[in-house]
Amino acid sequence: MFYFILFLVSQVVLLAAWVSGTLDPYQKKLQEKLLEAMGETKVSYGLKKSLTAKKLIEDENFSKIQDQLGNQLGNVFEKGGLGDGLGTLLSKGL
């Protein structure tokens, strides 16, 4: 019973810290580390997600073209891509 109450109190404290914005710098650093481990920058990941998430036309061939375009454009700005420096520079501002 004691551990359950301790768990609930820790969850309330964590929620309060998240809502107040105290965890924002840590969340940003964790996001950067995870993207770095995946070989992505914020720019490349954002381009891939924004261009492939919502399908403009419900045609299978057009959807494939849209996915490929989003992935190729995102790959330009990822680590080791042609726009790696620009992607890193822009990611620092995000």
Image (cartoon, rainbow, N blue to C red):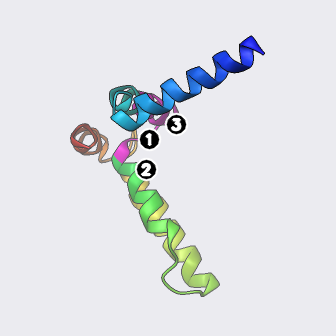
**Magenta segment includes 37:** yes
Considering the image in quadrants, where does the N terminus appear?
top right
Considering the numbered disc 2 on the image, is that residue within a helix, a strand or a loop? helix
- Left or right: 22 as drawn, with respect to 16: left
Residue on which disc 1 sits:
40
Q: Most extreme residue toward the top, as rendered?
A: 2
Nearer to us in this view, 68 or 52:
52
- Hey, what amino acid is under mark 3? Met
Q: SS for tag 3?
A: helix
Q: Main secondary structure of the magenta part?
A: helix
| Magenta residue span | 30-42
**Marks 1 and 3 close (CB-CB < 8 Å):** yes
Q: Amino acid at mark 2?
A: Tyr
Q: Quadrant of residue 31?
A: top left
Q: Residue at x 58, y 27 (%)?
A: 11
| Residue indicated by mark 2 | 45
The residue to which callout 3 is attached is: 38
Q: Residue at x 57, y 78 (%)?
A: 63
Q: Are marks 1 and 2 in contact (CB under 8 Å)?
A: yes
Where does the image place residue 38, in percent across and percent down from the top left?
A: 52, 36
Give the mark nearest the N terminus, 1 or 2. Answer: 1
Up/down of 50 relative to 10, above or below = below
Q: Which residue type carries mark 1?
A: Glu
Q: Earlier in the sequence, mark 2 or mark 3?
A: 3
Mark 1 Cα shell of 10 Å, populated few (<14), some (14-19), many (≥20): many
Crowd class of label 3 (few under 14; some 14 to 19; many from 20; radius 10 Å): few
Residue 20 place in picture, x, y as percent: 34, 34
